[in-house]
């Protein structure tokens, strides 16, 4: 008997973490027993054995975009039969919610740390953020919701602390990584050529920052920490932001050499050119780049409000600190200003993530689906 599964994601961005999770999950979930349909405004990646339903209502602003999509998707679900509905958006009509964006309330609390008093007040008064928080509460406390998938234990604890939800409904399933696609062997294939293109020599220590939305990902802290180091460390930035000029000017002002790579469909050559990942994010449930970098044998410096910190063993495969503690981040960078230390810790990072395969992720997801279907 074929199980019909709907996966809901509003918009597709090639470098988006949720989109990459869905793409990887779809590769592992395809089978004769599982018929998958993606419901989205627009889906660019048509690879894989799954259907696509387009749901693209007119939008005039952020609230209209979120509310309109949620309303129309719920109407669409009434017209089609699905055994399970898994949403990556905050919808009250889903059976399973994957909390890939974490808890919006917690993100706002973290963001306030870098805002002025006036900006914090405006954030509290924002109709959009009020809508998202209310939609989140309605979904988590909905009687229809059968399960929540978290990609870190950090997010699980945040959900339990902020909403009335039974702990047994929450499953922690890490994203998983293809260790044959992201591999230390990339170093031999790409490192020298890519460094020459960026005008970095092979003796220089190079950090890599990967992610769009620089405020949230902590690029300013990364640049300031690099400027505080005694030895110069170069930086590769893969991603983009509407305030790109601000960060470029800050790097020039503080004397930090940065190669601005923009959004890349294939970030692997840049991992190969780097010595460690630097991601002092303000708040991130568990970015895929943590898995990717560690699989490429790069040690990681990240923040304690990043779900990926759960994989970090201090001084063994990376370091963690508060996202705004520039001195602590700079000290961690200084620990990695020796090529041999980066290689040793990178080997440990690779060993850490080898246990988190895509097959394991697929097995955990299908086991969850089977469990939920048995209860219906």
Image (cartoon, helix red, strand yellow):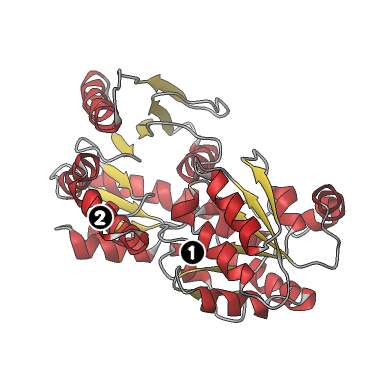
The picture quadrant where one finds residue 337 is: bottom right
Judge from the rendering whether residue 224 lies leftward or rightward of residue 284; answer left or right: right
The secondary element bearing badge 1 is classed as helix
- Residue 208 place in picture, x, y as percent: 65, 58
**Residue 285 against residue 225 in the figure, above or below:** above
Judge from the rendering whether residue 170 lies leftward or rightward of residue 304; answer left or right: left
Residue that numbered label 2 is attached to:
118
Question: Mark on residue 177?
Answer: none
Residue neighbourhood size for the residue with mark 2, other residues' Cα within 10 Å, grouped as few (<14), some (14–19), many (≥20) = few
- Residue 291 place in picture, x, y as percent: 57, 58
The picture quadrant where one finds residue 142 is: top left
The C terminus sits in image quarter = top left
Which residue is more in the foreground, 370 or 271? 271
Visible in this render: residue 210? no
The N terminus sits in image quarter = top left
Q: Residue at x 32, y 56 (%)?
A: 107
Which residue is more in the foreground, 250 or 145? 250
Residue that numbered label 1 is attached to:
308
- Residue 236 place in picture, x, y as percent: 68, 54
Q: Earlier in the sequence, mark 1 or mark 2?
A: 2
Closer to the eye: label 1 or 2: 2
Q: Residue at x 58, y 70 (%)?
A: 225
Q: Residue at x 16, y 45 (%)?
A: 134
**Residue 354 against residue 237 in the figure, above or below:** below
- Disc 1 to disc 2, C-alpha distance: 32 Å
Numbered label tally: 2
Q: Residue furthest front?
A: 253
Visible in this render: residue 207? yes
Which residue is more in the foreground, 278 or 140? 278
């Amino acid at each position: 008997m074929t199980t019909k599964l709907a996966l809901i994601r509003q918009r597709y961005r090639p470098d988006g973490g949720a989109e990459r999770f869905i793409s990887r999950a779809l590769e592992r979930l395809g089978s004769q027993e599982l018929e998958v349909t993606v419901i989205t405004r627009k889906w660019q990646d048509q690879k894989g054995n799954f259907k696509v339903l387009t749901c693209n209502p007119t939008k005039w602003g952020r609230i209209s975009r979120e509310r309109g999509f949620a309303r129309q998707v719920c109407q669409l679900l009434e017209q089609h039969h699905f055994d399970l509905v898994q949403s990556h958006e905050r919808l009250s009509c889903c059976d399973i919610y994957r909390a890939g964006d974490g808890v919006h309330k917690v993100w706002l609390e973290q963001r306030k740390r870098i805002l002025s008093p006036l900006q914090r007040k405006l954030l509290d008064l924002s109709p959009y953020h009020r809508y998202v928080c209310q939609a989140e509460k309605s979904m988590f406390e909905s009687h229809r919701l059968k399960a929540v998938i978290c990609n870190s234990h950090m997010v699980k604890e945040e959900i339990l602390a902020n909403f009335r939800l039974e702990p047994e409904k929450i499953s922690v399933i890490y994203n998983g990584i293809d260790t044959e696609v992201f591999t230390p062997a990339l170093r031999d294939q790409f490192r020298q050529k890519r460094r020459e293109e960026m005008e970095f020599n092979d003796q220089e220590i190079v950090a890599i920052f990967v992610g769009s939305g620089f405020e949230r990902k902590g690029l300013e802290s990364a640049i300031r920490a690099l400027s505080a180091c005694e030895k110069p460390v170069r930086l590769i930035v893969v991603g983009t932001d509407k305030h790109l000029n601000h960060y470029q000017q800050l790097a020039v002002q503080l004397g930090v050499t940065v190669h601005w790579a923009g959004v890349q469909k294939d970030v692997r050559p840049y991992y190969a050119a780097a010595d460690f990942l630097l991601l002092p994010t303000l708040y991130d449930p568990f970015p895929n780049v943590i898995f990717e970098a560690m699989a490429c044998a790069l040690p990681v410096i990240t923040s304690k409000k990043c779900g990926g910190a759960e994989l970090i063993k201090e001084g063994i495969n990376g370091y963690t600190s508060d996202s705004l503690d520039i001195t602590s981040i700079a000290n961690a960078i200084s620990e990695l200003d020796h090529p041999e230390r980066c290689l040793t810790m990178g080997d440990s990072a690779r060993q850490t993530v080898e246990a988190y395969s895509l097959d394991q992720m697929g097995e955990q997801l299908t086991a969850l689906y089977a469990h939920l279907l048995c209860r219906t």
